[in-house]
Image: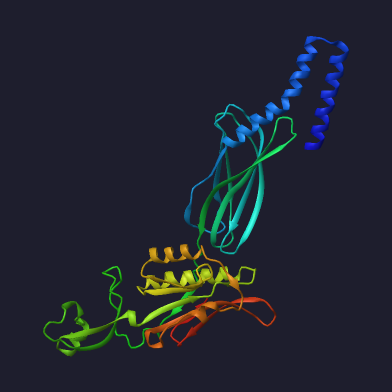
């Protein structure tokens, strides 16, 4: 379009100059002079407008759901008195977790002294950190001879959380074997401890540790001896492996659902994964739903690594006597090459069943 516009513009100049030479009137001289200076003047004006244009993209949001439309508001502000007939925005939508990126061009007019507000929406079928950005805008001059471009940095982030899988049951009988009674909910002081033994009452023992039901049966006061759950950690190790077919997304759904299930039964745990971005293991103790949400929000800023790497399993360091359970979740390959989500229980203390 630029080359054709230049040819047309030159032809018009030559034709107008020809008419000036033939008719030699003041009006024709004014027309020729106007055409001659039109290009540099309008290019200068559009360069000035381009310099003044600013772009903003919505606001950051956390805790959004998959497959639900996310409204995006893009504002291009023009503080000058010069309107733009056509402005092109390069809109980029990137899921940083899976390193998936899509680009789209949007064309719109820009009003003088106001600008333009564009409202659109996006949806994501997968969890992750969705970055919506405008990194470049472009506009044609009035004669459409030159396309002017400007690099901009306007972006917003949207955290898409995993879905809750309703038909998930966690069989934790082995985890609580030997446990007579667990303390009341962590809502009552976050006392997450296991009853290790029951013995007779001694002066100085706390009244809250009295096992009233057993005391009635025994005919004497019996108290519960507790052991801190810090020596009985429940760790969920997630391998952030993906083969490009997003099987990892289902694993995140299940682990997120397991976490909610455990918290609903007043069981604390630690999420653990290898961070490719940080080059180390990341651990996130979880004692309530806010902590679970925070852990998954931070997880969405990470990236995946190749299937079968098992970097988390290789990097995790622990002493067996300090861990009651390690649930290792990863994506594997079936014999026919299809991917499947696998959950392995180390130390045989947790059984996961999908109904």
The color scheme shown is rainbow
Which residue is the extreme one toward the top? 25
For the residue pair 352 and 59, the one nearer the viewer reads as 59
Which residue does the image show at 48% across and 51% down from the upper left?
60
Query: Within the image, what quadrant is residue 143 found in?
Result: top right
Percent across and percent down for residue 327 are 47, 80
For the residue pair 180 and 58, the one nearer the viewer reads as 58
Query: Within the image, what quadrant is residue 214 found in?
Result: bottom left
Relative to 243, 72 lies left or right: left
Residue 1 in sight here = no
Percent across and percent down for residue 295 are 44, 66
For the residue pair 339 and 137, the one nearer the viewer reads as 137
Query: Within the image, what quadrant is residue 42 found in?
Result: top right
Percent across and percent down for residue 244 are 65, 68
Residue 199 in sight here = yes
For the residue pair 82 and 74, the one nearer the viewer reads as 82
Which residue does the image show at 51% across and 55% down from the upper left?
158
Percent across and percent down for residue 207 are 16, 78
Image quadrant where one finds the N terminus: top right
């Amino acid at each position: 379009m630029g080359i054709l516009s230049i040819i047309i513009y030159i032809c018009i100049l030559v034709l107008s100059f020809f008419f000036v030479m033939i008719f030699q009137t003041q009006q024709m001289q004014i027309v020729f002079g106007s055409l001659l200076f039109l290009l540099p003047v309008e290019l200068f004006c559009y360069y000035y407008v381009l310099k003044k244009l600013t772009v903003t993209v919505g606001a950051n949001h956390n805790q959004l759901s998959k497959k639900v439309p996310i409204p995006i508001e893009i504002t291009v502000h023009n503080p000058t008195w010069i309107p733009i007939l056509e402005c092109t925005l390069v809109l980029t939508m990137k899921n940083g977790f899976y390193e998936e990126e899509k680009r789209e061009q949007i064309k719109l007019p820009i009003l003088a002294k106001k600008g333009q507000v564009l409202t659109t929406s996006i949806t994501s079928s997968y969890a992750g950190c969705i970055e919506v950005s405008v990194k470049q805008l472009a506009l044609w001059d009035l004669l459409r001879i030159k396309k002017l471009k400007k690099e901009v940095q306007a972006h917003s982030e949207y955290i898409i959380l995993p879905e809750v899988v309703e038909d998930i049951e966690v069989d934790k009988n082995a985890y609580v074997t030997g446990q007579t009674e667990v303390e009341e909910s962590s809502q009552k002081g976050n006392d997450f401890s296991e009853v290790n033994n029951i013995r007779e009452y001694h002066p100085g023992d706390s009244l809250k540790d009295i096992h009233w039901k057993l005391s009635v049966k025994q005919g004497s006061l019996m108290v519960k001896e507790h052991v801190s759950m810090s020596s009985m950690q429940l760790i969920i190790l997630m391998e952030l492996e993906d083969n490009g077919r997003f099987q990892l997304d289902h694993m995140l759904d299940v682990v997120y659902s397991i976490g909610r299930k455990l918290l609903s039964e007043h069981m604390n745990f630690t999420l653990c994964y290898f961070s490719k971005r940080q080059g180390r293991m990341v651990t996130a103790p979880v004692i309530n739903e806010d902590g679970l949400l925070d852990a998954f929000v931070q997880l969405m800023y990470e990236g995946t690594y190749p299937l079968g790497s098992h970097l988390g399993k290789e990097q995790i360091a622990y002493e067996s006597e300090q861990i009651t359970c390690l649930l290792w979740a990863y994506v594997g390959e079936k014999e026919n090459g299809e991917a499947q989500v696998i959950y392995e229980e180390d130390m045989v203390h947790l059984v996961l069943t999908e109904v």
